[in-house]
Image (cartoon, rainbow, N blue to C red):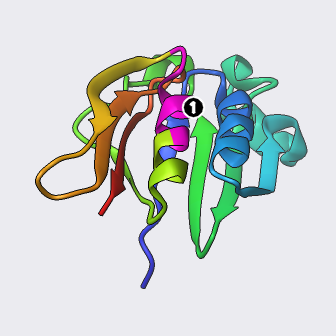
Amino acid sequence: MKVNPYLFFNGNCEQAMTFYAKVLDGKIEAIMHVEDAPPADQAHMGESMKGKVMHACIKIGDFHIMASDAPPERFNKPQGFDVSLQIEDFDKAKSIFAALSEKGSVNMPFGPTFWAKGFGGCVDQFGTPWMVNCA
């Protein structure tokens, strides 16, 4: 069994996933827009979803992050979770944290803790909460 986060965005999924692939050294495996679906399915998704992402997937190492745009009337701001990154290399962890937190907000600055060489928490510019840990 594998567990992969599935993130929902408020119309900026493609930008977010492109950013994550770059920052996390991932590979975009799929970005499917509503217009890629059969016409009957497009109609089911509604006018508010035209031009939006119905599914995207990036591969990061052996893991995946999947996502889509939520219909505006069903979008909820992410809360109650963080996407947790475990990174062995301290400099890489620090660099990734800096990139994720740029244009976002920092909950806990990246730095040494009693459990890790480095740890930090942030919410990125797309509203996704992250924890970056270097044990």
Main SS, magenta residues = helix
Magenta part of the chain: 95-103
Q: Is residue 9 above or below residue 66?
A: above
Which residue: 70% across, 25% down?
Answer: 49
Quick one: which residue is furthest to the bottom in this view?
Answer: 1
Residue 62 location (% of width, % of height): 59, 76
Residue 14 lies left or right of residue 108; in this view the side is: right
Q: Is residue 109 above or below residue 54?
A: above
Circle 1 sits in a helix, a strand or a loop, which is it? Answer: helix
Task: Judge by depth and name the residue closer to the eye, 125 or 115.
Answer: 115
Instruction: Tell me which amino acid carries mark 1.
Output: Ala
Which residue: 46% across, 42% down?
Answer: 94
Asked if the stretch drawn in magenta spans residue 23, the answer is no
Say which quarter of the image contains residue 18. top right
Say which quarter of the image contains residue 122. top left
Q: Is residue 82 above or below residue 5?
A: above
In the rendered view of the protein, which quadrant contains the N terminus?
Answer: bottom left
Which residue: 81% across, 39% down?
Answer: 33
Q: Which residue is labeled 1 in the image?
A: 99
Say which quarter of the image contains residue 39. top right
Residue 8 location (% of width, % of height): 51, 36
Residue 135 lies left or right of residue 1; in this view the side is: left
Task: Judge by depth and name the residue closer to the eye, 16 or 131.
Answer: 131
Quick one: which residue is furthest to the left in this view?
Answer: 114
Q: Is residue 123 above or below residue 31?
A: above
Residue 117 location (% of width, % of height): 28, 55
Residue 70 location (% of width, % of height): 55, 30
Task: Judge by depth and name the residue closer to the eye, 78 or 93.
Answer: 93
Crowding at label 1, few (<14), some or many (≥20) Cα neighbours within 10 Å? some
In the rendered view of the protein, which quadrant contains the C terminus?
Answer: bottom left
